[in-house]
Amino acid sequence: MRENRHSIREFEALRAVVTTGTTIGAARSLGVSQSAVSRSLVQLEARLGRTLFVRSSGRIEPTTEALNLNATLDPLFDTLQRIDGADWTDAADDPLRFAVPPSLAHDFALTKVSEFIARDPKRRVQLEVQASEQVVAGVLDQRFDLGLIGAKIQRSGVKYLPWRASRAVCILPSGHPLTEKKRIGPADLDGVPFIGLVRRHGTRTQSDQLFARAGALPRMVVETATSHSALEFVRAGLGVALINPFPILRSNTHGIEVRPFGELLEYRTSFILPASGPPKAMVREFMSFVRRTTPKDSYSETI
């Protein structure tokens, strides 16, 4: 079976000899030795099983096959020339399309985007604040270049890059009777006014299962879609809640008390990218910037 994997160097030698008419001229134009040109031509003829040049009395003449092949190579070398002259960096006016849920937007993403742009004012960012499911759907549809969410939503066509790990905590209004405890378990919340996340959240199902196993039934007062709103309801004294503490509790604990939750309820905050193709340069830069500039906290750790 004939080997068909040709090298660009062989095709360059062919074109140079056709253009200059001699192997000496071809070598000079390519910046290689005459023997290297001759060797490339012999290898190309061997691969094709065709005679491409007729050699006689020190002269070399292209055959019809060589001329036809040279014409066929025009699109290849035109493409190579465009590649050599292309600017492969992101266009200056090409924005980073970044999406986050509310719990990550107001206490984290807004600050990080501001700091990122401040380092290079020529950068542009389009920040979308949407529910986690819509963030994942937008990355899948490639309406967003990058997402950041605190829940794992199974969808093919996107890839997750886990970044932070955290565990659920119980937040209570200041002065609540349960603040006397160092740790809150599911049984402690039986009959206690409770702020819960709506059922479409995966952690709501997990917390319901933990309460059922403990034989506990908190008294649901409010169901809400975000940890941020749950925090505000707790601060208003309506009840207690279980939330992902990162990043919402880094500096937002006025009027509340925080206690570890006695059952394992884990969260993973992850970057989300389209599964098809590598991320563009600004996406890589922004992820690296977020990782480098996010300080340590007592509620989460880097994965």
Image (cartoon, rainbow, N blue to C red):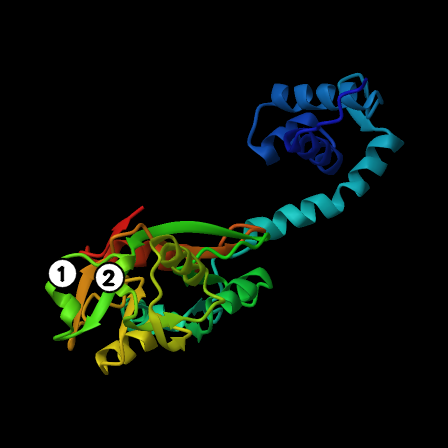
Q: Position of residue 148 (x, y in %)?
A: 41, 61
Q: What is the total number of numbered labels drawn onto the structure image?
A: 2
Classify residue 154 as left or right of residue 171. Answer: right
Q: Earlier in the sequence, mark 1 or mark 2?
A: 1
Residue 291 is labelled as: none
Q: Position of residue 276 (x, y in %)?
A: 59, 51
Residue 181 is labelled as: 1
Farthest residue toward the right?
64
Classify residue 81 as left or right of residue 192. Answer: right
103 is higher (above) or lower (below) than 207? below
Q: Quadrant of residue 184?
A: bottom left
Q: Quadrant of residue 290?
A: bottom left
Res 145 seen here: yes
Is label 1 in contact with label 2 (beta carbons under 8 Å)? yes
User: Residue drawn at (24%, 61%), measured in percent from left and top?
Assistant: 188
Quarter of the image with the N terminus in it: top right
Q: Nearer the viewer, residue 182 or 203?
A: 182
42 is higher (above) or lower (below) than 212? above
Badge 2 is on which residue? 188
Q: Amino acid at mark 2?
A: Asp
Q: Amino acid at mark 1?
A: Lys
For the residues carrying marks 1 and 2, which lies nearer the camera in this image?
Answer: 2
Classify residue 66 as left or right of residue 300. Answer: right
Q: Residues within 10 Å of mark 1 (few under 14, many from 20)?
A: few
**Dot 2 lies on which element?**
helix
